[in-house]
Image (tube, grey):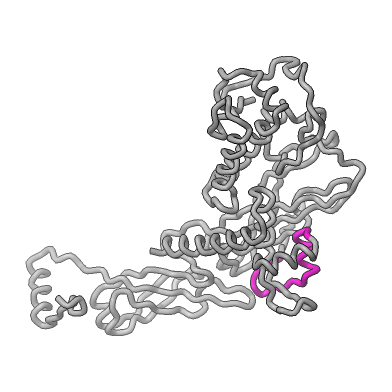
């Protein structure tokens, strides 16, 4: 038996920054779709100028969830933005309730 | 193999119209979508609904399925009669459906063959990146505090050489970095579904969740602990031993503390390489019971010596 090799992944936290190209590659989407997602408020770049858009790695989850909601439930992009915000709020409230 | 009552799963009558079926599906899909419903079992239910809809939305598949009659119960042991599908025409690969890999043996046996537009995919002619996978991993707070090595087994969809999709266990050894927090995700490149036609594998996203701890709970990087203290420790101050995720430490309770007072232990929370968290200790005053006459007398004496109206603020 050889020594077990433990995989070391990348932690996708607020400190990790992604470019538009990274986001496209990681989420398997086109730049056009990401533009639309930004316009509709699904994701929020840190740098507002399109030439140097940067995102925190937590936005990857928003893109992936939006894609699933769109694919599985036929929710459009403004609907995805709304659902994601409400889901965040719900999660926050659940956390607070658990604390009590 | 278990019989699946697709009508029961969608909660519709056997003679429901296609519109009714669609409505029932949409409603249930919204309710059980794993991104929306975080309860255990929601994902399984969502896949089950998807499978039922995959059959009932398609008039050809529905007619073939109806042929088994209405006497079967969901979960009953079932073997399709030989040539059950004779005399039906299936119009090719209209399988646009969600993720075929999650469908049951029952579905695979009936509709999984390529001539039924089933889950068999024609893949040899192109190269495609495998799909990303998502999984949750449950950690003890101590493992998050110290960092840990975890071995996890996930079930993963893989394509057989003949194009059939099967579920196989996939065991992974993962190093969890120190100071990971709940809800954070770790991306493991190339650990998702294998690629098609020599394409690269997808990635695996592991989402961190914490196992409930009897004493501690985490809020982002901070660890909270409710600490029982005696009235004299609170009133006079004391140095007490308290647990933290990193082991016991001494903490000073200042004189004149009240129940509910919060004390902060710097950097005793979930600290990562470049972020720190604290332990927040909330004092909970435990009132000793007055059992003996002597003890009761002591409380009465306190009442005399320290008259106080704790309900002053309530105006009573």
The residue sitting at 26% across, 83% down in the picture is B236
- Name the image quarter holding the C terminus of chain B: bottom left
Of A49 and B182, the residue lying toward us: A49
> The magenta stretch spans which residues?
A10-29
Q: Quadrant of residue B71?
A: top right
Residue B160 in percent (x, y) is at 81, 37
- Rendered position, B223 above or below B129: below
Q: Is B8 on the left or on the right of A78, as rendered?
A: left
Q: Residue furthest right?
A: B125
- Rendered position, B289 above or below B309: above
| Number of numbered labels in the structure image | 0
Residue B68 in percent (x, y) is at 64, 18
- Rendered position, B126 above or below A98: above
Residue A82 in percent (x, y) is at 58, 62
- Rendered position, B218 above or below B11: below
Q: Is residue B57 visible?
A: yes
**Residue A17 on the magenta segment:** yes
Of B24 and B38, the residue lying toward us: B24
Q: Residue furthest bottom?
A: B255
The residue sitting at 69% across, 30% down in the picture is B107
The residue sitting at 49% across, 76% down in the picture is B278
- Name the image quarter holding the N terminus of chain B: top right
Q: Quadrant of residue B163?
A: top right
Q: Is residue A12 visible?
A: no
**Residue B291 on the magenta segment:** no
Residue B97 in percent (x, y) is at 72, 41
Of B83 and B291, the residue lying toward us: B83
The residue sitting at 80% across, 68% down in the picture is A21
């Amino acid at each position: 038996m050889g020594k077990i090799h433990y995989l070391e992944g990348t932690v996708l936290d607020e400190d990790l920054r992604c470019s538009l190209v990274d986001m496209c590659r990681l989420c398997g989407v086109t730049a056009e779709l990401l533009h639309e997602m930004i316009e509709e408020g699904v994701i929020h770049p840190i740098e507002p100028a399109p030439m140097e858009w940067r995102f925190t790695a937590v936005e990857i989850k928003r893109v992936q969830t939006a894609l699933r909601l769109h694919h599985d439930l036929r929710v459009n992009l403004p609907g995805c933005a709304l659902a994601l915000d409400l889901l965040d709020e719900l999660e926050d409230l659940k956390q607070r309730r658990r604390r009590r | 193999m278990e019989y699946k009552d697709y009508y029961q799963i969608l909660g519709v009558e056997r003679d429901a119209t296609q519109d009714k079926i669609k409505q029932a599906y949409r409603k249930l899909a919204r309710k059980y979508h794993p991104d929306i419903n975080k309860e255990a079992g929601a994902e399984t239910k969502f896949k089950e609904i998807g499978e039922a809809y995959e059959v009932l939305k398609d008039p050809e598949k529905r007619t073939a399925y109806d042929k088994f009659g209405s006497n079967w119960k969901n979960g009953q042991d079932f073997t399709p009669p030989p040539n059950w599908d004779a005399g039906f025409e299936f119009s090719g690969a209209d399988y646009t459906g969600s993720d075929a890999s999650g469908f049951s043996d029952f579905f695979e046996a009936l509709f999984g063959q390529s001539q039924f537009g089933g889950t068999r995919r024609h893949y040899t002619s192109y190269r495609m990146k495998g799909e990303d996978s998502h999984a949750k991993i449950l950690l003890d707070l101590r493992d998050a505090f110290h960092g840990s090595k975890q071995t996890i087994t996930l079930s993963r969809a893989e394509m057989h050489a003949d194009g059939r999709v099967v579920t196989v266990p996939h065991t992974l050894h993962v190093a969890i970095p120190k100071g990971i927090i709940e809800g954070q995700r770790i991306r493991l490149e190339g650990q998702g579904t294998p690629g098609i036609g020599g394409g690269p594998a997808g990635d695996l996203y592991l989402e961190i969740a914490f196992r409930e701890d009897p004493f501690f709970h985490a809020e982002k990087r901070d660890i909270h602990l409710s600490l029982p203290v005696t009235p004299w420790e609170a009133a006079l101050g004391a140095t007490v031993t308290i647990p933290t995720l990193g082991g016991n430490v001494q903490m000073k309770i200042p004189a004149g503390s009240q129940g509910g007072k919060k004390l902060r232990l710097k950097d005793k929370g979930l600290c990562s390489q470049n972020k720190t968290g604290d332990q927040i200790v909330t004092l909970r005053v435990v009132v000793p019971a007055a059992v003996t006459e002597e003890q009761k007398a002591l409380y009465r004496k306190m009442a005399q010596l320290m008259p106080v109206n704790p309900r002053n603020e309530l105006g009573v």
